[in-house]
């Protein structure tokens, strides 16, 4: 499962950020996970808890916000929620659609002491 | 205290991938990340491709596998350079693994590197490994529901190879429906129905690959 390498990536980011701010404990981590990512939230939080043991992030609450998949048509400008992974504009049928959100895999913010 | 971070979790991997891309760009090498389930025919496709294009293009292969070197042994028989990466249970290749083996290849002599990723429709889709493009192989025996079940790997691919079409008469795979789903996930994608068994469609795939290499070479000479 690649959730483990994603969890390691999160741990690296939060420890580095905390060190830059001379924090002694990380209590809360907010993640943004896009709807069109291959992440199982439960495996991710489980993997993170295991990796964070014996670090200042031990016991940190990991909170995940799922970001909906939204497209924007380059033809007519329409923004729309992508249903059934269809990236054709529902208004003008254009195939020229930009992914506006839904591919996020990011650490949003931390609470530290 | 709250600290705003807003950093991509894949940032480190993407940085290494970008550095690899720069190296390949300098060497004028087209790099292909070959994806698909275990058994969909990635190694078979590679064998056919090497056999047909060996005299036209200088090809090397990087084989990703959980534990074995079986695929690398198959490729070696065709007389091209091949490097094996064992992920020891890891479900995908990452950019750092590719970086670690590049010294095993003589980049100055190559036109193409094909990287056969670990067989998996899920994890490899998230990790860039310095490639110019991803190509996903879906075989007829896997079922036509797979594009909508694993959309990301089809969204990220520049081309999808529908392999084992020789088996269409023996399955309930609806080729038209699968092509429609893949095209709605990724409008404009190149679809290549082939059979590595009978050779049907392979010529079109070879030509697509040669064209990609030429586009890359054209960029380099500018
Ligand atoms: N009938 C049929 N079998 C195929 C075709 N392509 C590959 N195979 C068989 O599928 C099996 C798995 O192929 P392989 O190349 O090892 O798949 P990989 O795991 O994706 O590398 C092998 O037994 C191949 O001979 C095809 O087009 N038609
Ligand atoms: Mg293989
Ligand atoms: Zn539109």
Image (cartoon, rainbow, N blue to C red):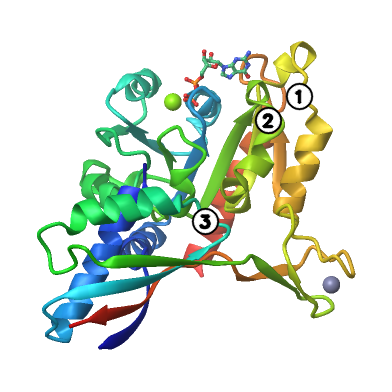
Give the image location of residue B168, x and y in percent.
76, 18
Q: For this view, does B86 lie left or right of residue B208? A: left
Q: Which mark is residue B203?
A: 2
Query: Residue most toward the right?
Result: A92
Ligand 2 image-quadrant field: top left
Of residues A9 and B134, the one nearer the viewer is A9
Q: Are marks 2 and 3 on the same chain?
A: no
What's the residue at 38%, 45% (across, down)? B110
Of residues B165 and A12, the one nearer the viewer is A12
Q: Which mark is residue A37?
A: 3
What subunit carries mark 3?
Answer: A
Label 2: how many Cα within 10 Å (few below 14, some 14–19, many 20+): few
Q: Which residue is mark 1?
A: B173
Quarter of the rendering containing residue A105: bottom left
Q: For this view, does B124 lie left or right of residue A82? A: left
Q: Answer yes or no: disc 3 within 8 Å of ligand 1.
A: no
Q: Is residue A13 above or below residue B174?
A: below
Q: Secondary structure at mark 2?
A: helix
Q: Is residue B134 above or below residue A34?
A: above
Of residues B39 and B53, the one nearer the viewer is B39
Q: Answer yes or no: disc 1 within 8 Å of ligand 1.
A: no
Query: Residue most toward the top?
Result: B170
Q: Secondary structure at mark 3?
A: loop
């Amino acid at each position: 499962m690649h959730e483990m390498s994603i969890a390691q990536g999160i741990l690296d980011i939060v420890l580095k950020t905390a060190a830059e701010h001379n924090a002694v404990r990380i209590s809360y981590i907010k993640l943004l996970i896009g709807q069109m990512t291959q992440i199982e939230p439960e495996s991710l939080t489980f993997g993170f808890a295991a990796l964070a043991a014996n670090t200042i992030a031990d016991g940190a609450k990991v909170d995940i916000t799922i970001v909906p998949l939204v497209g924007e048509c380059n033809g007519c400008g329409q923004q729309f929620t992508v249903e059934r992974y269809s990236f054709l504009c529902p208004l003008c049928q254009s195939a020229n659609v930009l992914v506006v959100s839904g591919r996020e895999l990011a650490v949003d913010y931390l609470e530290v002491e | 205290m709250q600290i705003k971070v807003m950093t991509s979790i894949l940032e480190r991997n993407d940085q290494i991938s970008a550095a690899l891309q720069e190296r390949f760009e300098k060497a004028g090498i087209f790099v292909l990340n070959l994806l698909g389930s275990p058994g969909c025919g990635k190694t078979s496709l590679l064998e056919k491709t090497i056999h047909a294009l060996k005299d036209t293009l200088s090809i090397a292969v990087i084989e990703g596998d959980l534990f074995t070197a079986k695929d690398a042994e198959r490729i070696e028989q065709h007389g091209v350079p091949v490097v094996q990466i064992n992920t020891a249970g890891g479900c995908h290749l990452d950019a750092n693994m590719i970086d670690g083996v590049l010294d095993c290849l003589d980049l100055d002599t190559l036109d193409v590197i094909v990287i056969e990723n670990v067989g998996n429709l899920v994890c490899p889709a998230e990790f860039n490994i310095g490639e110019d493009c991803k190509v996903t192989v879906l075989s007829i025996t896997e079922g036509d529901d797979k594009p909508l079940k694993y959309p990301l790997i089809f969204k990220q691919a520049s081309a999808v190879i529908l392999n084992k079409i020789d088996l269409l008469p023996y399955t309930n795979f609806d080729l038209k429906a699968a092509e429609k789903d893949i095209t709605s996930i990724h409008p404009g994608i190149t679809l290549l129905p082939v059979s590595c068994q009978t050779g049907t469609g392979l010529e079109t795939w070879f030509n697509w690959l040669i064209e990609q290499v030429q586009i890359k070479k054209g960029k380099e000479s500018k």
